[in-house]
Image (tube, rainbow, N blue to C red):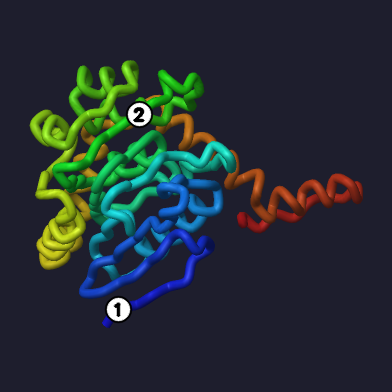
């Protein structure tokens, strides 16, 4: 049985079947450019996956010719990091990114911060911020997910990394004929879903702990901690108590 779940954005689809969650980016008219509402929907999907019965997730595009054109600069996603694995969102369950066509900018970061990456032979990994002239630094986390010199070349030149080179240098796990990346991701997900979930979760978290985080991840973690306090009911109650010149009552929420 497949479970379809409505999400915040019409451009993000979520389904579950046989222990596998699939999160699909569907905005073909904008080449899957990601805006704020889409990142909110992605976070909602990831949260549902983390809290639900599915054992593994696949992140993919509904269009085999483009994974994502990156952030929608006409509607910039200010808090995009909240929906990026190991930035603002964590789970010990494995996540597979399936890339066909171009993965650009924020879309590339989103994909490569997943635990496994499957690419079609037509895939291209592109990080153009050095050419565009604006940057927030999120891509620097990829130095823990790719060989340093290859990651630096991609970041500082802005030139595409082809699927074959990404595979040969260990940036991605599997390369398959064009158009078969989602099917391969499903096969991989099926293998993972059949394994002992507690073992998978323990080994994933211990492995990520072993390689450690990056300064940009620490920055996002600090933001998340501050946001949790400043957006809490306690904070709202404290400000109201201050205005009313009375002692606040805290409830830890």
**Between 72 and 93, the one nearer to me in the picture:** 72
From this viewpoint, is residue 61 visible? Answer: yes
Mark 1 highlights which residue? Answer: 2
Residue 136, horizontal then vertical, whole percent: 48, 27
Residue at (18, 45) in percent of width and height: 119
Residue 18, horizontal then vertical, whole percent: 21, 74
Q: Residue 200, located in which quarter of the rendered image?
A: bottom left
Q: Is residue 135 above or below residue 25?
A: above
The crowding category of the residue bearing disc 1, from other C-alpha atoms within 10 Å (few below 14, some 14 to 19, many at least 20), is few
Q: Residue lying farthest bottom? A: 1
**Between 73 and 23, the one nearer to me in the picture:** 73
Residue 244, horizontal then vertical, whole percent: 91, 50
From this viewpoint, is residue 200 visible? Answer: no
Q: How many marks?
A: 2
Cβ atoms at labels 2 and 1 below 8 Å apart: no
**Between 179 and 217, the one nearer to me in the picture:** 179
Residue at (53, 63) in percent of width and height: 8
Q: Residue lying farthest right? A: 244
Residue 92 as seen in the image, left or right of residue 189: right
Residue 94 as seen in the image, left or right of residue 75: left
Residue 93, horizontal then vertical, whole percent: 26, 56
Q: Which secondary structure lies at badge 2?
A: loop
The crowding category of the residue bearing disc 2, from other C-alpha atoms within 10 Å (few below 14, some 14 to 19, many at least 20), is many
- Report how far apart the C-alphas of labels 2 and 1 lie in the structure: 35 Å
In which quadrant is the C terminus drawn?
bottom right
Q: Nearer the viewer, mark 2 or mark 1?
A: 2
Mark 2 highlights which residue? Answer: 127
Residue at (48, 58) in percent of width and height: 41
Q: Earlier in the sequence, mark 2 or mark 1?
A: 1
Q: Which secondary structure lies at badge 1?
A: loop
Q: Residue 183: which numbered mark, if any? A: none
Residue at (78, 51) in percent of width and height: 248
């Amino acid at each position: 049985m497949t479970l379809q779940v409505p999400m915040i954005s019409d451009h993000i689809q979520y389904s579950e079947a046989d222990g596998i969650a699939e999160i699909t980016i569907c905005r073909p008219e904008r080449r899957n450019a990601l805006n704020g509402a889409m990142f909110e929907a992605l976070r909602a999907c990831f949260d549902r996956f983390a809290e639900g019965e599915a054992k593994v997730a696949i992140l993919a595009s509904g269009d085999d010719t483009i994974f994502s054109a990156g952030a929608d600069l006409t509607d910039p996603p200010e808090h995009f990091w909240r929906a990026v694995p190991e930035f603002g969102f964590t789970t010990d369950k494995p996540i597979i990114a399936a890339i066909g066509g171009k993965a650009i900018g924020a879309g590339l970061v989103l994909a490569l911060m997943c635990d496994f990456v499957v690419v079609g032979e037509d895939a291209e990994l592109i990080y153009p911020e050095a050419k565009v002239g604006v940057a927030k630094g999120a891509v620097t986390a990829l130095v823990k997910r790719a060989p340093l010199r290859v990651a630096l070349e991609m970041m500082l030149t802005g030139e595409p990394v082809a699927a074959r080179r990404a595979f040969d240098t260990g940036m991605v796990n599997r390369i398959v004929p064009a158009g078969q990346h989602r099917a391969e991701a499903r096969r991989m997900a099926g293998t993972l879903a059949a394994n002992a979930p507690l073992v998978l979760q323990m080994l994933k978290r211990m492995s990520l702990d072993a390689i450690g985080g990056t300064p940009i991840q620490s920055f996002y973690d600090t933001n998340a901690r501050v946001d949790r306090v400043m957006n809490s009911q306690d904070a709202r109650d404290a400000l109201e108590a201050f205005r009313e010149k009375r002692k606040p009552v805290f409830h830890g929420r």
